[in-house]
Image (cartoon, helix red, strand yellow):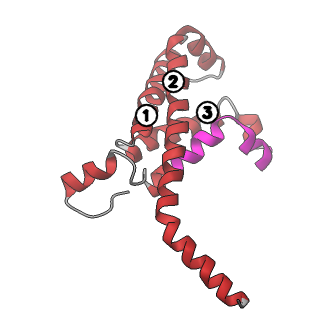
């Protein structure tokens, strides 16, 4: 086989498996990060006094309200990601919460350099939130059949 034939064969194979691979990757990302969001939010709410104190130490206004709000957003948004329901809607407040985490709790590390930025705990959460916002939840989600049923348009993954 000539090099150009090998390239064309490999390209053809990957173009055929790409939709399924994309859906598997999105499913894995949604479930792992969604469940992590859920657990993080649950932890914030279970230890609301400690979370409120931490938010207060960061200078966040109305720390009690914001601790409960962020905990609720993370729990609810995390479950929505796990099930792939209202995924893009859920990704927006989750991404905002992670951006705020960078601007408050991880401010010093976030602006030192790319290694420090990507090494901080909000990074994976922010990245997956943005990926779901940009690409949707994939076909293995509740969003896809709901959109097909309600909107009568093809492929909402």
Q: How many numbered marks, from 0 up?
A: 3
Q: Nearer the viewer, residue 84 or 15?
A: 15
Using the rendered image of the protein, determine whether residue 113 is visible from the camera's viewpoint: no
Q: Residue 77 carries which label?
A: 1
Q: How far apart are marks 1 and 2 (CA)?
A: 9 Å
SS for callout 3: helix
Residue 26 higher or lower than 99, as above or below? below
Q: Nearer the viewer, residue 8 or 123?
A: 8
SS for callout 2: helix
Q: Where, by quadrant of the figure, is residue 69 drawn? A: top left
SS for callout 1: helix
Query: Residue at 73% across / 43% down in the picture?
Result: 117
Residue at the spot of label 3: 101
Q: Which mark is residue 41?
A: 2
Q: Earlier in the sequence, mark 2 or mark 3?
A: 2
Give the magenta part as a residue range: 112-130
Residue 79, image x and y in percent?
42, 32
Quadrant where the C terminus sits is bottom left
Query: Residue at 76% across / 49% down in the picture?
Result: 114
Residue 14, image x and y in percent?
56, 71
């Amino acid at each position: 086989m000539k090099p150009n034939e090998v390239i064309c064969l490999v390209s053809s194979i990957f173009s055929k498996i790409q939709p399924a691979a994309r859906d598997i990757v999105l499913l894995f990302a949604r479930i792992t990060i969604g469940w992590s969001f859920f657990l993080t939010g649950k932890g914030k709410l279970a230890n609301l006094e400690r979370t409120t104190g931490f938010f207060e130490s960061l200078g966040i206004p109305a720390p009690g309200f914001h601790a409960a709000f962020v905990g609720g957003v993370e729990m609810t948004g995390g479950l929505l990601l796990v099930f792939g329901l209202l995924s893009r809607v859920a990704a927006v407040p989750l991404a905002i919460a992670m951006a705020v985490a960078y601007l408050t709790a991880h401010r010093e590390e976030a602006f030192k350099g790319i290694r420090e930025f990507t090494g901080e705990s909000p990074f994976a959460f922010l990245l997956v939130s943005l990926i779901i916002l940009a690409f949707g939840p994939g076909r293995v989600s509740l969003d896809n059949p709901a959109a097909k049923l309600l909107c009568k348009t093809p492929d909402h993954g």
